[in-house]
């Protein structure tokens, strides 16, 4: 078995194996890298992984006599799908469901797994009609946060991150944005108009420079699904992918946003047609000009 440092040590490697659908989500890569550093020592992590891979329950599977549901992603990079198929074959009367995709973690698109679990527990599949609304999504994250955190140390980085978060939240309040989620140094917010989202992103970028930070931002407008306090759907993915293309201090927007704010006085430079990972088609992207 390769050492933990060889297999998981590089930023993005954890996401590559456990949640490949999120490989173009910069804040998640940074967050997972910090999580690994802070949660354990390299030797402790390697010992845990060796223990996990050495677990062998094959000889007791036939003794399971309660209803069992086995869920497994077809392209799971961390645990091959044949493991799930084997469990289902060896557990008497187990129900086996193979989910599409490559993610080991079901957290990023949980609806399918939750639906299967609900049906298994209740005997009924609930058909949910998603609540869809037109909204503008804004993604922001700190550029180079992993290197900065490593250079500063945990305490100083935490103080700087709190200052950054205070700036973001103050500007969301000022421009009537709604904070949807935050993890690490990334924010997702929604607005009822794209111009306010752009002005908000620009002000966030200007104010965090006072703390010697740079943020990148992406803005897109489209229909989103309301899932509790969260939002989902292709429009959210487009906003995230556009944000990942931005450089330090940049606010990138989709062509949809540029067209919607015509006449607002906002100016843009054309960044050309882009392929957005996991999003069909080609998308013209523009940078907001200060």
Image (spheres, helix red, strand yellow):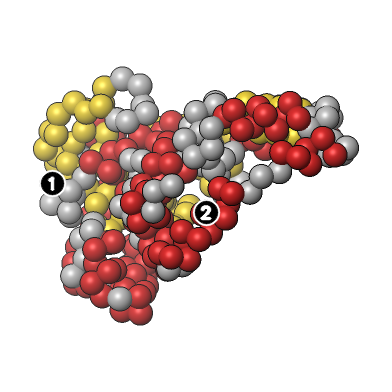
Q: Earlier in the sequence, mark 2 or mark 1?
A: 2
Numbered-mark total: 2
Towards the viewer: 164 or 29: 29
User: In this rendering, is residue 183 above or below 19?
Assistant: below
Towards the viewer: 109 or 258: 109
* Residue 47 rendering spot, x and y as whole percentages: 50, 61
> Dot 2 corresponds to which residue?
50
Identify which residue is drawn at 47% across, 61% down: 45
* Residue 174 rendering spot, x and y as whole percentages: 36, 62
User: Residue most toward the right?
Assistant: 65
User: Residue most toward the top?
Assistant: 281
Identify which residue is drawn at 78% across, 32% down: 91
Asked if the residue at tag 1 contacts the one at tag 2, i.e. Cβ–Cβ closer than 8 Å, the answer is no
What separation in Å lies between label 2 and label 1 (alpha carbons)? 52 Å
Identify which residue is drawn at 22% across, 28% down: 274
The residue carrying pointer 2 sits among few (fewer than 14), some (14 to 19) or many (20 or more) residues within 10 Å by Cα, namely: some
Rendered image quadrant of residue 60:
top right
* Residue 130 rendering spot, x and y as whole percentages: 61, 32
User: In this rendering, is residue 96 above or below 194?
Assistant: above
Question: In this image, 119 relative to 259: left or right?
Answer: right
Rendered image quadrant of residue 95:
top right
Identify which residue is drawn at 43% across, 65% down: 43
Can you see residue 69? yes
Which label sits on residue 289? 1
* Residue 164 rendering spot, x and y as whole percentages: 32, 68
Which label sits on residue 107? none
Please state which of the two labelled residues, at mark 2 or mark 1, is closer to the viewer.
2
Can you see residue 200? no
């Amino acid at each position: 078995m390769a050492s933990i440092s060889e297999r998981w040590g590089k930023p993005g490697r954890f996401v590559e194996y456990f949640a490949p659908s999120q490989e173009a989500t910069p804040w998640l890569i940074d967050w997972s890298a910090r999580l690994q550093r802070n949660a354990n020592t390299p030797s402790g992590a390697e010992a845990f992984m060796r223990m996990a891979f050495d677990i062998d329950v094959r000889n007791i599977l036939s003794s399971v006599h309660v209803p069992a549901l086995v869920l497994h992603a077809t392209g799971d990079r961390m645990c091959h799908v044949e493991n799930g198929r084997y469990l289902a074959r060896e557990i008497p009367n187990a129900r086996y469901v193979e989910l599409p995709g490559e993610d080991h973690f079901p957290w990023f698109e949980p609806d399918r797994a939750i639906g299967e679990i609900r049906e298994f527990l209740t005997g009924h599949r609930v058909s949910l009609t998603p609540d869809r609304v037109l909204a503008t999504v804004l993604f922001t994250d700190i550029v180079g946060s992993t290197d900065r955190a490593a250079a500063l140390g945990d305490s100083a980085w935490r103080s700087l991150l709190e200052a950054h978060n205070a700036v973001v939240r103050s500007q969301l309040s000022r421009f009537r944005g709604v904070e949807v989620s935050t993890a690490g140094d990334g924010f997702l917010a929604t607005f009822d108009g794209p111009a306010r989202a752009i002005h908000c992103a620009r002000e966030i970028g200007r104010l965090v420079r006072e703390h010697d930070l740079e943020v990148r931002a992406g803005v897109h407008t489209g229909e989103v699904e309301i899932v509790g306090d969260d939002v989902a759907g292709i429009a959210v993915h487009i906003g995230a992918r556009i944000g990942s293309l931005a450089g330090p201090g940049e606010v990138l927007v989709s062509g949809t946003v540029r067209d919607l704010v015509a006449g607002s006085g906002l100016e843009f430079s054309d960044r050309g047609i882009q392929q957005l990972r996991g999003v069909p088609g080609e998308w013209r992207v523009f940078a907001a000009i200060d």
